[in-house]
Amino acid sequence: LQYLNLCENQLESLPSGLSVLTKLKALDLARNVIKSLPDIFSQLTNLEMLYLSRNHLSSLPSSISCLKKLSHFLMDNNR
């Protein structure tokens, strides 16, 4: 699995087991009600696109800095 679209699902948190998707290149979590993110991004090293717009986030986990291939990152309209 390289692209996972979970946009507009009223998610409050990330699905368990997401960290095992190590080949994931794009993750769309926009337009949910996510308040916080688990510190799992160090396992998602192939992630190039991460969309977090329109959630209820006020901070990011430190593991976001492990995403060296990340070229598209959206986080507008959060708290």
Image (cartoon, grey):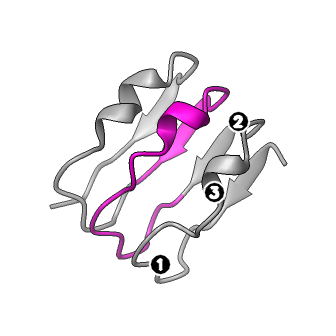
Which residue is at 38% across, 33% downward? 63
For residue 2, what is the image quadrant? top right
Q: Residue furthest top?
A: 68
Say what secondary structure mark 2 lies in.
Answer: loop
Q: Is residue 69 above or below residue 56?
A: above
Magenta stretch bounds: 29-52
Q: Which of marks 3 and 1 is in front?
A: 3
Label 1 sits on a secondary structure element that is loop
x, y percentage for residue 68? 51, 16
The CA span between labels 3 and 1 is 13 Å
Q: Looking at the picture, which amino acid does disc 2 mark? A: Lys
Q: Quadrant of residue 38?
A: bottom left
Residue receiving disc 1: 11
Decide: few, some or many residues near mark 1? Use Cα within 10 Å; few <14, some 14-19, many ≥20: some
Q: Main secondary structure of the magenta part?
A: loop
In the picture of the structure, the residue carrying the numbered disc 3 is 18
Q: Which of marks 3 and 1 is nearer the N terminus?
A: 1
Which image quarter is the C terminus in? bottom left
- Element type where label 3 sits in the image: helix
Residue 64's place in the image compared with 26, above or below, is above
Q: Which of 39 and 57 is in front in this view?
A: 39
Residue type highlighted by circle 1: Leu
| Front residue of this view, candidates 22 and 70 | 22
The total number of labels drawn is 3
| Image disc number at residue 25 | 2
Question: Is residue 50 located in the magenta-colored stretch of the structure?
Answer: yes
Is residue 67 shown in magenta? no
Near mark 2 (Cα within 10 A), the count class, few <14, some 14-19 or many ≥20, is some
Residue name at image x 52 percent, y 42 percent:
50
